[in-house]
Amino acid sequence: MHTVQLSLPPTLGRFRRSRPAARPRPTADTWVLPRSSLYRIARPLGWRIQCIAGRAWITHDRDPRDIILEAGESHTCDRPERLIVQALEALTLRVLPPAG
């Protein structure tokens, strides 16, 4: 019977509990949507939608309001329910995450 001695790389001998990587903060995003297209945001509370060009119809699930945004207008989401955006005409939006 032969005995073989194994040497482990120095990093294998050290066990450290790793911390989960910090999630990057969302940044502003610009959407260009053709007429009649739809876009959804799952949990939009605090997000701000700015209409750069065109017209958008916006609504939240379980909210009776319909919001129409035209170029130069914005909407800050005040509900956590899913947000639906439809381009009433060719549309450019800037979507900004909650501050803080």
Image (tube, rainbow, N blue to C red):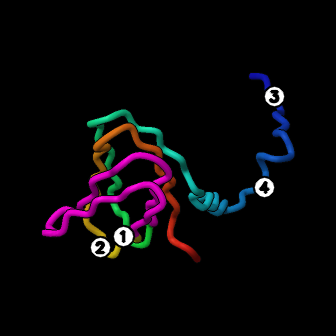
Between discs 3 and 1, the one toward the N terminus: 3
Dominant SS of magenta comes to strand
* Circle on res. 24: none
Query: What secondary structure is found at the residue carrying circle 4?
Result: loop
Label 3 or label 4, whichever lies nearer to me, is 4
Measured Cα–Cα span from mark 3 to mark 4: 22 Å
The outermost residue toward the top is: 1
* Circle on res. 14: 4
Task: Tell whether 74 sits left or right of 61.
Answer: right
Query: What secondary structure is found at the residue carrying circle 1?
Result: loop
Residue at 23 percent across and 60 percent down: it is 59
Kind of residue at disc 1: Cys
Residue at 48 percent across and 43 percent down: it is 31
Residue corresponding to mark 2: 79
Residue at 62 percent across and 58 percent down: it is 24
Q: Dots 4 and 1: beta carbons under 8 Å?
A: no
Residue corresponding to mark 3: 4
Task: Tell whether 61 sits left or right of 30.
Answer: left
Q: Dots 4 and 2: beta carbons under 8 Å?
A: no
Q: Quadrant of residue 38?
A: top left
Between discs 4 and 1, the one toward the N terminus: 4
Closer to the camera in the image, 16 or 62: 62
Between discs 4 and 2, the one toward the N terminus: 4
On screen, 74 above or below 1?
below
